[in-house]
Image (spheres, rainbow, N blue to C red):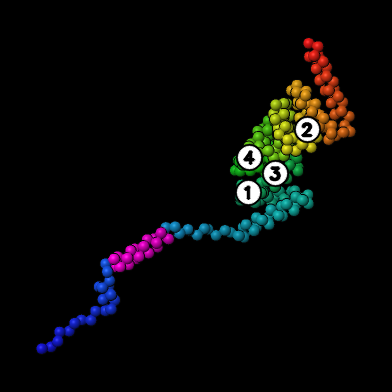
Amino acid sequence: MSKKMIPKIPLINKIEEKAPDNQRNQQEEKVQEKKIEEENIKVIEIPQTEKIDTSQVEKLTNLISSVRTLIARGMAHEAQTLIVEWLSIEKDNRELNLLLGQIYEQEWQYEKAEYIYKDIAELHSNDIEILEKLANVLIIEKKNIVANEIYKKIYTLTGNTETTLYMLTHISNTLHNDLETLHYAKQYVLQWPKNPEIIALLANVQVSLGMRKAAIETYKNLKNLTPYSSEITETLQKLLLEEELANNFQWKE
C-alpha cells in the first residue's frame, strides 16, 4: 500500500494559520491605516504655485531705479515717459504711480498729482504714505476740509504720531476750529514739549477760548523756550495784567 502524499504547506501559510486572530487583525489594521495615511497626504498636498516671471520683476526693479535717478538729475520728462510707458501695461503699480505723483508735484501740477494719489488710494485705502501725500497736496490746493478728514483717518490708523498731530493742529487752526486745535495741540505738547510753534498755537487758542490762566502758563513755557522774543514777552505781560485786574475786580465785589 502506497503512502499518502501530504502536500507541503509554505512556511508563511503555516505561520498565518498558527497566528492568533488578534495578530491577523493588527496586520489588517496597519494596512488600512497606511491606505488612509496615503489618502490624507493626497488631500493636503499643496499644489505648485505658478512660476514668477523673475525677468519681469527684475525689469520693473531696474525701471524704478532708473526713474528715481532721472528725477534726482532733474530729468523729469524722461522719467515721466518711462513711467507712462509701463503704466500702460500695469496701470495700478503703486511705486510708479507715487513717482508720477512726485513728478507732478515738482512741476506744480497739483491737480494731476491729486488725481494720481486719489486713484491709487482707492486700491490702498490704509496706506499711510499715499494718504499723507494726498492730504498734503490737498492742503497746497487749500482743500483743507478734505485734508483734515484724511489726516483724521491717518490718526485712527497710526495714533499719536508727531507728524499726524502736527498736521491736525495746523489744519484745525487754519479752519478756525478752536476746540480741535486745542485738543490736538495739547496732545502734541504732552509728548513733544519743546516745539515753540505748536506751543504758540496752543497759547493763542487758549486765549481765544477765554482760558486766560492756562494761556499764561503756556506763554511762560513759551517764553522759556524763546527768551528773546519781545512779542511773547509783551503778550505774557498783557495777560498777567488782565488776570490781576480781573482778580481785583472780583475781590472788590
What's the residue type where badge 1 is placed? Asn
Left or right of 171? Residue 92 is: left
Q: What percent of the width, then of the height, locates residue 133? A: 69, 41
What's the residue type where badge 2 is placed? Ile
Q: Disc 4 or 3, which lies upstream in sequence?
A: 3
Towards the viewer: 161 or 214:
214
At mark 3, the secondary structure is helix
Instruction: Decide: few, some or many residues near mark 2? Use Cα within 10 Å; few <14, some 14-19, many ≥20.
Output: many
Q: Which labelled disc corresponds to residue 199?
A: 2
Note whether 159 is above or below 237 in the view shown: below
At mark 4, the secondary structure is helix
What's the residue type where badge 3 is placed? Gly
Q: What percent of the width, then of the height, locates residue 217? A: 79, 28
Residue in view at x 63 percent, y 43 percent: 127
Mark-to-mark CA distance, 4 and 1: 23 Å
Mark-to-mark CA distance, 4 and 3: 23 Å
Residue in view at x 30 percent, y 68 percent: 23
Q: Residue furthest bottom?
A: 1
Note whether 63 is above or below 4 in the view shown: above
Q: What percent of the width, then of the height, locates residue 43? A: 42, 58
Towards the viewer: 173 or 196:
196
User: What residue range appears in magenta?
Assistant: 22-42
Q: Which labelled disc corresponds to residue 93?
A: 1
Towards the viewer: 74 or 135:
135
Q: Disc 1 or 3, which lies upstream in sequence?
A: 1
Q: Is residue 27 magenta?
A: yes
Q: Which labelled disc corresponds to residue 101?
A: 3
Residue in view at x 39 percent, y 61 percent: 37
Instruction: Locate the C terminus and report the quarter of the image it occupies.
Output: top right
Determine which residue is flagged by label 4.
157
Mark-to-mark CA distance, 1 and 2: 41 Å
